[in-house]
Image: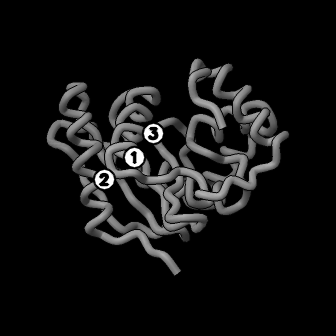
Amino acid sequence: MAKLRLAECRRFIRAVMEKAEEMKVPVSVAMVGPEGHLIAMERMDDAGWITPETAAAKAFTMAAFRSMSPRFQDGLVTQQWLRERNPQLAVNAAVFTGGKIFISGGAAPVFKGNELVGAYGISGGTSDQDEVMGCYAREKLGWLHKPAKDDTPQEVKDHINAIYDKVGLGKRKL
């Protein structure tokens, strides 16, 4: 069974903060295991007072939703999917989990091979800025936000690609 280790999380957090400093946007970053339990969290100086809690909730949400379905590739897709299907579900899920659900960009699952090993959440910038930081860090470290062997059904891929187009991320494709 693969695991996401603390040392790996620290490297990811450093990469996010490197990009955050370049963008001049102080953030908090949280990393959780596949069950949603916190592995690491760090808040940059001057990051907003609630950003640690928001980052942790984003990471928890990605672990929870991705473990349910391959539809939930990242926070932006999850947010749009809920808007289209059942906006009340996000509110209800937040209540049922004691506020641990927060759906926004800047969050994604983490895979080693085909195994979900955790998720991350970034908070402090706009949803788009947080997403840019997460993508930068993933690419820098070679992390996967989906399984190495993609067995996502084509209709799910088509739907996710349509969402990417709708939210202005048409360059991103499954």
| First-in-chain label (3 vs 1) | 3
Q: Residue furthest right?
A: 155
Are discs 3 and 1 less than 8 Å apart at CB?
Answer: no
Q: Residue at x 56, y 53 (%)?
A: 62
Give the residue pinned by disc 3: 106
User: Do we see residue 99 in this rendering?
Assistant: no
**In the shown orientation, is residue 78 left or right of residue 111?**
right
User: Do we see residue 35 in this rendering?
Assistant: yes
Q: Residue at x 36, y 68 (%)?
A: 39
Give the residue pinned by disc 2: 12
Seen in the picture, residue 118 relative to 87 is either above or below; the reply is: below
Q: Looking at the image, what colour scheme do you see?
A: one colour
**In the shown orientation, is residue 97 left or right of residue 29?**
right
Q: Mark 3: few, some, or many residues within 10 Å (few <14, many ≥20)?
A: many
Rounded to the nearest whole Å, what is the CA distance between mark 2 and mark 1?
7 Å
Q: Position of residue 79 (x, y in %)?
A: 63, 36
Amino acid type, residue under disc 1 in the picture: Arg
Rounded to the nearest whole Å, what is the CA distance between mark 3 and mark 1?
11 Å
| First-in-chain label (2 vs 1) | 2
Q: Position of residue 28 (x, y in %)?
A: 30, 45
The numbered dot on residue 88 is none
